Amino acid sequence: MNRRTFLQSSALSGGGLLLSFTFLSSFKEKANATTQELNGFVKITSDNLIQIMSPNPEGGQGVKTSMPMIVAEELDVDWKQVQVIQADLDTKHFTRQFIGGSQAIHQGWKPLRQAGATARQLLREAAAKQWQVPVNEVTTDKGVLYHKASGKSASYGSMATAASQIPVPTQVELKKISDFQIIGKSKQNVDIRKIVTGKPLFGIDTQVKGMLYAMIVHPPAFGLRLKNIVTGAAHKMPGIKAIFPIKLFNDGYEKTFFDTTTFPEVVAIVGNSTWEVMQAKKALQVNWEPFASYTQARDMLGRKVVEKVPGGLESTSEHITAMNARMQQAGTVRRKDGDIDTAFKSAAKVIERTFYGPYLAHNCMEPMNFFAHVQGDKVALAGPLQKPEYTEQALAARLGISVENIDIKMTRLGGGFGRRSYAHWLLEAALISQKMQAPIKLQYSREDDMTAGIYRSTYSAKFRAALDSNNQLIGFHVKTGGTPESPLYPNRFPAGAVDNYLAEDWTIDSNITVGSFRAPRSNFMAAAEQSFLDEVAELAGKDPFDFRLDLLKRAQTNPVGKNNEYDPDRFIKVLELLREKSQWDTRKKTKKVGLSAYFCHDSYAAHVLELRMQDGNPIIENVCCAVDCGIVINPDAAKNLSEGGIVDGIGAAMYGKMAIEKGVPQSSNFDTYRMIRHHEAPKKIDVHFVKNDIDPTGMGEPAYPPVFAALANALYQATGKRHYSQPFADNLL
């Protein structure tokens, strides 16, 4: 099957779709095999093929392999027997069917184990009933049931039908961690063969008979809205079926957290092919006009807010001026311990530094796209998105169609990083399909994607530290904010480790839309905070490791305040592991190395980055990484996530920047938006995990934030110059 023909239309009731491919080609279900569903996660065929559903979208983080591994472990099967199938959106069988916040495994750990253990128990009970023996005498091993006393045995497949008729037990026993056979052992990505051979997996691959193609035109600048369309010659160009505006939300609709979109009204162009639509788009004349400031009600995951959207054509230079001015004013106090004013007045040494981070674009490899077919009160959809359940709810409200009549099939994401959390392009595709009464594939160009907003916010942070005559940290003050959101996490390290601590923040309203960006807010705060702590350590005359460890030991033995988010013991163990594996104490004497450590997404990550300068540019020789994410499900995949985060973080820190001039994004493709190149990646990355029996915590994002500061601190060692503003490349010369 080729990449262009994997999705076929079906005569299913209501115009539903059938994804006509399996996700693991080495397993092909026999035509006469009977499949029994033991629960939403586990299906077993009569010929003993174990099918395990992967409920969450796959965007390169490896959940399509790791989540079924957890089920398979408790089910007690041979991994070679397992066929992994990407589940559709199914709120009946699954909960939290989305990716974001590095929480898929963390939140799914117990439910996935329960699903596997429950299916195993049903099979044991079926065997016990058939063999007329006590269920506690029935054991399992690699997909086979045994009764050792009688010598009886049976495959799971032979008992599946009987097991499916047994009432689901309310309680099941889970394996001891010491008995794990699959978890903790590296398994190959279940899609790897299809990926490297170009088989259809991604939304952009979608093809359906009779499908039309669509693109959108959005305002060329933030602060503008649609005035009118002059179709002219564009409407008469070859292959063009229609040109019309679409409005994403009904009047009075209360947007939710993930209903974020920069341009609620855009122009749709529909035709017979993507190429024809692109040509018409170039010829189309659309007139735009400024909009006035307005407010809108939002339901932010249960928190009701009124959001201000100012009018006007904004510019980066104006944002910086406004943020500098706001930094001189009092912020909103989010945490205060001790007497911060007295601490600074009595200090022997005081240091103050201000950091800045620009807007960043996600730039997923696969531009935004979606397939939609609206037929009456039935909607069939397929494509890449991170939060299908929330998007489904928004679509139901817009179309006036019950969520029960909306079918979303999840394809693999060609990158997400938070960008595909705000799937307004799904709404666009569905509205175009409804208008055209035809199946539609909506495709964004790279330029559409890069200039449509939902960037990482632009941030600024001022840090102050006070040292006493013994070079002990006695005061710490952070004031931070952004346009339009604050990056502050007031209860993270070094909160809890300093007697006198103050955290405050502020925001500046903007019409430039921002949203989740890999390790939201943490990516900036880690860069600023960990760069600053290195400078404080230097002022105190202390080794960067020793300085951080001393603070963490204070938080461990005599913590200050309440609500400290991090576990000092876990944090200490990560730093100690990194110090050992990086050979810091010897390497720092002869190499240019930088340290950074950060807690986010319930996990701990720390890096030592080594570089050298050549012709004014850094050559990154090595990054040594230590991570505590609890139990590691799939070690190779976890290493891949860390390595990817490190490379991505270095690229963003060195080169990432989206400037705005009078509302217009100054980069629309990779010729002007600088990304890291192959030769700029580290020559070597070593990843090490703290071994413990803690339930899994976040893994997709924690390695990303600390590498910014590890790079900045290494650059200082190599050049003698500190970096307070991203991207660092702008400040190297």
Image (cartoon, rainbow, N blue to C red):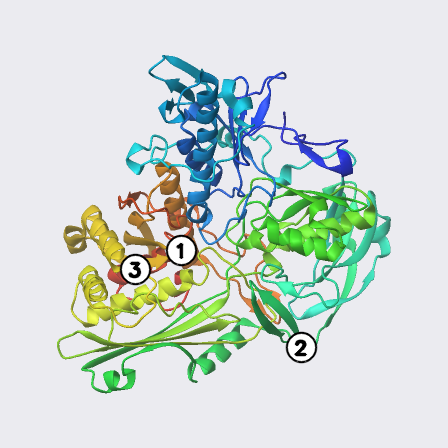
Q: CA distance from mark 2 to mark 1?
A: 35 Å
Task: Please determine whether, in this image, residue 543 is positioned above or below residue 110.
Answer: below
- Left/right placement of residue 224 relative to residue 367 reads right
Q: CA distance from mark 3 to mark 1?
A: 27 Å
Q: Which mark is residue 601?
A: 1
Q: Which mark is residue 293?
A: 2
Asked whether 218 or 496 is in front, the reply is 496
Q: Which mark is residue 715?
A: 3
Horizontal and vertical percent position of residue 529: 33, 67
Mark 3: give few (<14), some (14-19) or many (20+) Cα within 10 Å: many
Asked whether 703 or 33 is in front, the reply is 33
Query: Which picture quadrant has residue 527?
Result: bottom left
Task: Please determine whether, in this image, residue 16 is positioned above or below residue 249.
Answer: above
Tell me which residue sits at (36%, 35%) in the image. 183
Q: Which one is in front in this view, the residue at disc 2 or the one at disc 1?
A: 1
Q: CA distance from mark 2 to mark 3?
A: 43 Å
Q: Amino acid at mark 3?
A: Leu
